[in-house]
Image: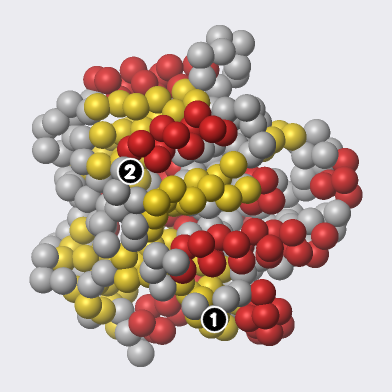
Amino acid sequence: MTRLVASTPRADGFRMPAEWEPHAGTWLLWPERPDAWRLGAKPAQHTFAELAAAISRFEPVTIGVNHGQFRNARAHLPDSVRVVELSNNDAWMRDCGPTFVVNDGGDVRLVDWEFNAWGGLNEGSYFPWDKDDMVPEKVSDLLGVGRYKAPLVMEGGAIHVDGEGTVMVTEENLLHPNRNPDLTREQIGQYLLDYLGAEKVLWLGRGFDPHVTNGHIDEVACFVRPGVVLMAWTDDESDWRRPICADNLQRLRAASDARGRRLKIHKLPLPDEVVVTEEEAWGLDRVAGATWRDTGRREPASYINFYICNGGVVIPAFGDPRDEEAHGIIAGLFPDREAVVLPGREVILNGGCFHCITQQQPAARTT
């Protein structure tokens, strides 16, 4: 039975570990919404199955499915992937799922953020989102893990941590009025410190997706080890993303982390935006209250949206001329992990990629 912990991770000596620290496994959700994933989600299901199979080479994988998709998912996934009934509204486990925290004694608990489908009734991507908002509570119950309920509307794609006290976010996302309009920047920052067990917040400016995620950090920058940041970059002065990159670079150069280290910064080239084709738009159901992806809609592809697992790093490819260069940079920053490259177009068509659909569970005891 779920045990709600009436304090904060920081007060109890818990912290969110970095993504490169050892995992007990990875969690995903199975896509099925025909208004979000084209052709009844069949192409997306193929991509999710490829991703789950790739990660399962390195660590255990659990994928949550709605009742009506259980047998279909089970048939598409290798035996090494565990399939559990876990009702949901859509498949973005990073954003609606829990954030895990650990202590120095080897215990793990989770943080349950408020989820409002990236904007609530006025700007959210779909309604309802009630099943998504219950995913952390159900994961807590499945694992027998203590759960902290955070009084903050936030998604997992909004944060990156170095595991040593530093959390990186964007102002565009965390300060957006469709998340926590009654909270100040200082109050939001304090909640991040309290519920991530962190000591310092690094505020970047904007992301590349103002309409859906409202500028998640996992499109623009990430930690690759303590004191080292990988950030999205373009040299093209005519690219609308260039001022965003330049501002984020300036902020990172001026920043230090929670340990007082100046940051070492690596640049990662940006691919061209992915443009939704007529065939891809045609394959979507039209449902009131959902975000439509019409022909010509531009989606914010970014290689930053890779996923680190035990012994591996899974990197998206977009069929872009910069794919090979970007893959080489990421692989070079993780020399002790196997680089696995998978097509990411079916996921980015819905506004995210591999980091957005995964959530790591750290290797620790459940308490």
Q: Is residue 270 visible?
A: yes
Lateral position of residue 115 relative to residue 293, left or right: left
For residue 162, the mark is none
Q: Tell which of 262 and 174 is nearer to you.
A: 262
- Report the label total: 2
Mark closer to the chain start, 1 or 2: 1
For residue 334, the mark is 2
Residue 198 vertical position relative to residue 83 in the rendered view, above or below:
above
Q: Is residue 232 visible?
A: no
Lateral position of residue 252 relative to residue 104, left or right: right
Q: Estimate the x, y position of residue 227 in percent, counting from the top left.
A: 21, 35
Q: Residue at x 68, y 65 (%)?
A: 45
Q: Tell which of 65 and 323 is nearer to you.
A: 323
Q: Estimate the x, y position of residue 226 in percent, counting from the top left.
A: 21, 41
In the rendered structure, which amino acid carries the disc numbered 2?
Answer: Phe
Dot 1 corresponds to which residue?
79
Quadrant showing the N terminus: bottom left
Residue 229 vertical position relative to residue 124 in the rendered view, above or below:
above
Quadrant in the rendering for residue 239: top right
Label 2 SS: loop
Lateral position of residue 293 relative to residue 47, left or right: right
Q: Dot 2, how many residues are within 10 Å of its Cα: few (below 14), some (14-19), or many (20+)?
A: some
